[in-house]
Image (tube, helix red, strand yellow):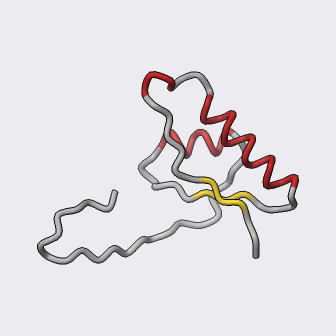
Amino acid sequence: TEFGALGLLYVVPEARGQGLSKVITSHLAHTFFSRNLPAAVIIVNTNGVSLKLHESLGFKVKCTLEILHYTPANDQTPMF
């Protein structure tokens, strides 16, 4: 199944609060819809700002996802 995936949008702090994320996300979603593709996004559940943005655009939670990440004992690199 083909779908349009949204993700990894970052707005620099000095440009936040101007609605840029909403405009960009809405435009991308409508681009996918115009091609008969569903739009999907994966959001870390602690990212309340992103959850609120997507819900305001009509996105609905379809499922939750558990990510299993293996880190060798000596690796201190955080995943998130």
Which quadrant would residue 33 be assigned to in this image? bottom right
| Residue 27: quarter of image | top right
Image label count: 0
Give the residue drawn at x 54%, y 44%. Answer: 9
Depth check: give the residue in front, 48 or 2.
2
Residue 19 image offset from top left, x and y in percent: 62, 27
In the figure, 34 relative to 18: above or below? Answer: below
**Side of 32 relative to 47 (left or right):** right
Decide which of 62, 40 is in the foreground and name it: 40
Residue 24, given in percent of the width and then of the height, sits at: 67, 38
Q: At which x and y percent is residue 57?
A: 71, 41
Q: Residue at x 65, y 35 (%)?
A: 22
Look at 48% across and 43% down and name the residue there: 48
The x and y percentages for residue 45 are 46, 54
The C terminus sits in image quarter: bottom left
Quarter of the image that includes the N terminus: bottom right
Quick one: which residue is furthest to the left in this view?
Answer: 74
Residue toward you, 47 or 71? 71
